[in-house]
Image: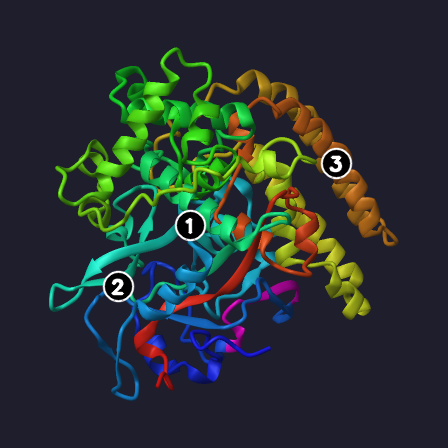
Amino acid sequence: MTKPDYLHDISDIHLEMFNFLENAEKDIQGTRIWDLSKLFFKQVIFDKVNTLISSIDVETLTVPGFIGIADTTEKILDPENNRVNGYEDVRKLLNTEGLLICTYQYNKDRYGAPINLVEITEKQTQDWSLGELNDFRNFFINNEGHHTGTMVPATRKDDDNESIDGFAFLNEPDDYHKGLFGDQGFVAVAQSLIFSEPITKEQSLEYCKSIICWMSLLNPFVEFPENYNQDGAHVRDVTTLQEILRHTVKAALGNSFSREWLKNKQNHCYCSEFVFLGINSVLYPFNRNGLTKLLKDEENVDSMVNDILALQKKHNDLQQPKTILSDMSNNPVFQKREIKMPEVDEKLNPLDEMITDHEGLPLQPLKLSQLLRLAFSTILPRKITIEHPHIYHKIFEIEVKMWIKVIELTFKTFAPPLSTNSKASPRLPDLSDLIEKINPYVEQLKTTLKNLIEQSNATFEELDKTLDTAFKNIDNLFKDEDLYYYAPPRIFIDWGQEGSDKNTLVPDTWGIKFKTQGVLIYKGVIKHQI
C-alpha cells in the first residue's frame, strides 16, 4: 500500500532540530533523543541486586509515521531551506476524514527517563510529594497523554489577507493553545473516526460535521474543572448525555438556569471528557431530526430547534453581527468565526437508528479499575514473560508489588489531589461512608497480593482472578459515583491500537472505531518535503 505523501518516516526527521525544540513541559527531566524509533518506548526497571539492574524496553504505543504541522499561515523554512506551509498536510487529512482527535504526549519531554518500578514499590506511600504523584500519574496511569483536543477545518487568513483552507482546534478549556496546535515542541497522536457499516463515507463526514457543531455549541458554556486530575466523567450513559446537550441548547438560547447548571462543578468537563462528549453526540445529529429527538420533551420544541439552527446559520454568516457563541468563546479562532458550524444533511439519522443492535453510548468511559489495568498492561505487558520466560517470576513479583503500591496510592484517601493545586477538588463529594465500606475489600486485596508474592509457583492467572474478585466488589460500591468513571486522554489512543492486548481492556465501542493517522510534529523539522 502506497504511503500518503503527508506521512513521513524517521529518516525524514532532522533529529538535531527536533531536539532543539523546547519541550511542552519544562519541569520533566528527560534526555536528548538519540533514537527516534524509540520515542514511544520506555525502559522499565523491574529488578535490582546491589548496583546491578534488570530492565526491559516496552513499546507503549505504535504509530505509522510523522505528520508536519505549524500554526502560522506564513510559510516556514524546512531543514533544507525550502519554503513550506504548516497547514497543507493536516488539511489533506481533514478533507478526507472530517476531523482529527489529537492526544498530546509527554514522550519527547521524558525521553530516556526510565520507569524504576523497584524504587516506586520501595518508597513509603506517605513520603510521596504531589509532584511525584503527578509524574507517576502521567507516565504510568496516563501513558504520557496529557491533553486531547479536536482538530477541525478552519478558513484562515494568510500573509496577503487571503482566505485559505487551514485548521484550528476545539479544546476545553476553550482558549487552550489559542485554538491552534500550540508550541513547536509539542507532540500529538492524530486519529480519525471510522464509522461501522452500514455507514457510508459520506455519512461519516456528515457525522463529523455534526460533532463539530456540537463542540462549537458546547465550548462557550461548559467549564473546565479546577482540579482536572481528580475530576471524574459525568457523562457515562445516554441519560447524562441528553442532560448536558439539552442544557447546552437552552444556554445558547439564553436560559439562565441552564447556564448556571453548566457552571455547577459537578457538570464541568476536562479536555478529553469534552471530546468524549462531542463524539457521543452522534446519537443526536445537529440537524432538525436529531435536535427534535433531543428536545422532544420540551413544550416549545419546534421553536427551539428553529432558533438553534438560525443561530448556527448566523454564526456562519460573516455579514451578520457576532453571535452569543463567538462572544462568549475564549477561542481566538472561533471568536473570528474562522471555525464554522457546518450544515448537517437533514437526512442524517441518529447513529443508534442506523446501527440498531447496540445500546447505550457508542463510547463508554473507563471505570477506575479498568484504567488501572490498562496502565499495567502498557508498562508490564504479559507478552514479556512469553518472550522471556526466564524472568517470569521477577516480572510477576514486581507486578504484584506495583498493584499493592498503586492500590495504596489510589484508595488511601480515594483519588488524592494530584495537581499542584493544594486544594481538594471542589467537585469531590464526601465519600467518607463509602471509603469505610470499601476499606475491608482494599485491605483484603492487599493481604491476598502479599501472600501471592510468597508463593514461588504463583501465576498471572491467579493474580487476575484475585483482581477480578476484588474489583467486582469495588466497582459495585462505586457504580453510582461520577468520580469512579474516567475518559482520560489515553483512552482514544488505546481504542486505536490495532492488535494490542489493550483493546480487550477498554470498553467496547459500537459504531465508531479510531484509526491512528500519525504523530503531529513541527513541520520545520521534516526533510524531503519537495
Q: Position of residue 102 (x, y in %)?
A: 43, 55
Residue 512 is at least partly visible in this image: yes
Marks 1 and 2, the one that precedes in the sequence:
2
**Residue farthest front in this picture:** 347
Spatial distance from mark 2 to mark 3, Cα to Cα?
53 Å
Query: Residue placed at 53% from the left, 23% from the top?
Result: 239
Q: Position of residue 132 (x, y in %)?
A: 45, 49
Q: Which residues are magenta?
A: 37-49
The kind of secondary structure element at disc 2 is loop
Q: Is residue 455 left or right of residue 365?
A: right
Q: Which residue is mark 3?
A: 447
Q: Closer to the camera, 369 or 63?
A: 63
Its colouring scheme is rainbow
Q: Which residue is mark 1?
A: 148
Query: Residue placed at 53% from the left, 61% from the top?
Result: 516
- Residue 71 numbered mark, or none: 2
